Structures are given as structure tokens and as C-alpha cells.
Image (cartoon, rainbow, N blue to C red):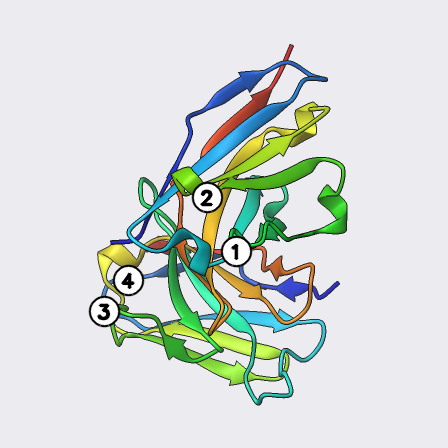
């Protein structure tokens, strides 16, 4: 199965800063249609899990533009520019290229 | 708006089974496949499997074959997951999540259902 590694378990950030969360895959997530099957999710306490990014770089409806997905092949990044207090959450990457679909271990964003 | 309402927390004994539900609203239930995901502190998020509500067709993570059984009731727009032969290792929060087939993103999630297996 494809392993997704989110190196940082926790990242500390101050409001207004930029932060980047990385996700490394054990094999390329590029499909023959030219798209990467990598998505990003946010988990906040008391709220349902929210999809942020799909195909590595496309924001889902309503996601603020400060959330930016990038990367290709096996290396992907979720960047949050001008971090807001409501961005303090757990973030996961997910690959849906090959079953069993697998998640990264998660990165917890915390306030400095 | 799209909503997935899951059943409540369960406290169950080892060796028994439990059936979790996920009631969908705000869209045509048979238009989107439904995933089930397990979350624990130690193992993070694990994909259990997926069901096509229209056909009843399923695909399971081999790790959960024999443990989880996915079904649907189209008349009530509800997806179910039965977990059998429960052990303490099955204690977790379980989520249902809708799949957008056009982008393979899980665009709507239930609130999660906690299962605790203890004697």
C-alpha cells in the first residue's frame, strides 16, 4: 500500500504567519489523466472534518484563498498564509490513487 | 446543504457486534459513494472501505475484511457499517464520508461515532 508521511506531528505558529505542512508519498500519486490523487483535510474540535484541497492544488468550495496546495509526484505541501486563530487544527493528507486509500499521520497546528 | 448524521456512542462487550448508521440528507443518496474511516490516537485515520449506494457494491481495505460489513438502505438514505467479533482494538471513532467521484475527494463527513469495547 502507499504510505503517506507527514514529518511534523506538530507545528507552532503565530497569527499572521505563514506555515507549510508537508506530505510525502511512497510512490507517485500522478494518474494517467494527469491529475494527482492527493487531498487535504482539516479537523477542528467540535466540527466535522473539512475537505480543503483536492488534486493536490484545487481548493474545495468555500475554502479561503490563504489555503494553498502544491506539489507533484511524491512531495506535497499545504501552505496556510496569514494564519488565523480558527486555523488551529489537525491536518491530514489522503491519497485516493490506489486502494487501500491511505492517510498521512496528521500534523497538529498549534499557537505559539 | 449536505449532511451526514451518524448514530451515537456505543459501549459494547468483547466478542459482540455493533451496527453504526449514517443518515444522508441534502443530496441524492445514490449519486455518491460512501466511505467509512476509523480514527484512533495511535493509528490515526484508516480507510475501512466504500459502498456504492446505488448498486450495493463494496470495496474493503483488506485489513478490515471480515471485521466490517457495509450496507445501505436506499429508502431511508442511510448507510450502515457492522463491526463484528469486537475486541478492544476496535475501540475508535468511526466516520462516514461522502465521495465526490469527479475529484475523488471526501467532501462531506459525519460527526463521528465513538465505539468503546470493554467488558
Q: Do the residues labelled 4 and 3 touch (CB within 8 Å)?
A: yes
Q: In x, y percent, where is residue A15?
A: 24, 63
Same-chain status of marks 4 and 1: yes
Q: Which mark is residue A16?
A: 3
Q: Which chain carries label 3?
A: A
Q: Which mark is residue B24?
A: none
Give SS at disc 2. helix
Q: Which chain carries label 4?
A: A
Q: Name the residue under label 4.
A: A14
Horizontal arrangement in the rendering, residue B8 relative to residue A9 (left or right)? left
> Dividing the picture into quarters, in which one does residue A81 lie?
bottom left
Determine the CA span between mark 4 and mark 1. 20 Å
> Dividing the picture into quarters, in which one does residue B4 lie?
top left
Tell me the mark number nearer the camera, choosing from 2 and 4. Answer: 2
Q: Mark 1 lies on which chain?
A: A
Q: Mark 1 points at which residue?
A: A106
Give SS at disc 3. loop
Give SS at disc 1. loop
Determine the CA span between mark 1 and mark 2. 34 Å
Q: Which residue is drawn at 71% across and 76% down?
A: A27
Amino acid at each position: 500500500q502507499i504510505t503517506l508521511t507527514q514529518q511534523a506531528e506538530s507545528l507552532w505558529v503565530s497569527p499572521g504567519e505563514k506555515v507549510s505542512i508537508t506530505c510525502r508519498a511512497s510512490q507517485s500519486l500522478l494518474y494517467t489523466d494527469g491529475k494527482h490523487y492527493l487531498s487535504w483535510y482539516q479537523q477542528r474540535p467540535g466540527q466535522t472534518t473539512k475537505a480543503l484541497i483536492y488534486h493536490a492544488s484545487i481548493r474545495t468550495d468555500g475554502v479561503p484563498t490563504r489555503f494553498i496546495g502544491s506539489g507533484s509526484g511524491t512531495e506535497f505541501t499545504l501552505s496556510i498564509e496569514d494564519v488565523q486563530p480558527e486555523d488551529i487544527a489537525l491536518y491530514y493528507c489522503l491519497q485516493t490513487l490506489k486502494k487501500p486509500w491511505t492517510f498521512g499521520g496528521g500534523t497538529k497546528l498549534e499557537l505559539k | 446543504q449536505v449532511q451526514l448524521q451518524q448514530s451515537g456512542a456505543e459501549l459494547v462487550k468483547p466478542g459482540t457486534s455493533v451496527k453504526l448508521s449514517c443518515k444522508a440528507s441534502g443530496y441524492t443518496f445514490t449519486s455518491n459513494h460512501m466511505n467509512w474511516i476509523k480514527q484512533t490516537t495511535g493509528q490515526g485515520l484508516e480507510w475501512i472501505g466504500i459502498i456504492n449506494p446505488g448498486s450495493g457494491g463494496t470495496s474493503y481495505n483488506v485489513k478490515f475484511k471480515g471485521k466490517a460489513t457495509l450496507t445501505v438502505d436506499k429508502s431511508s438514505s442511510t448507510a450502515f457499517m457492522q463491526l463484528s467479533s469486537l475486541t478492544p482494538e476496535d475501540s475508535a471513532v468511526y466516520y462516514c464520508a461522502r465521495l465526490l467521484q469527479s475529484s475523488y475527494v471526501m467532501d462531506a463527513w459525519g460527526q463521528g461515532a465513538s465505539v468503546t469495547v470493554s467488558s
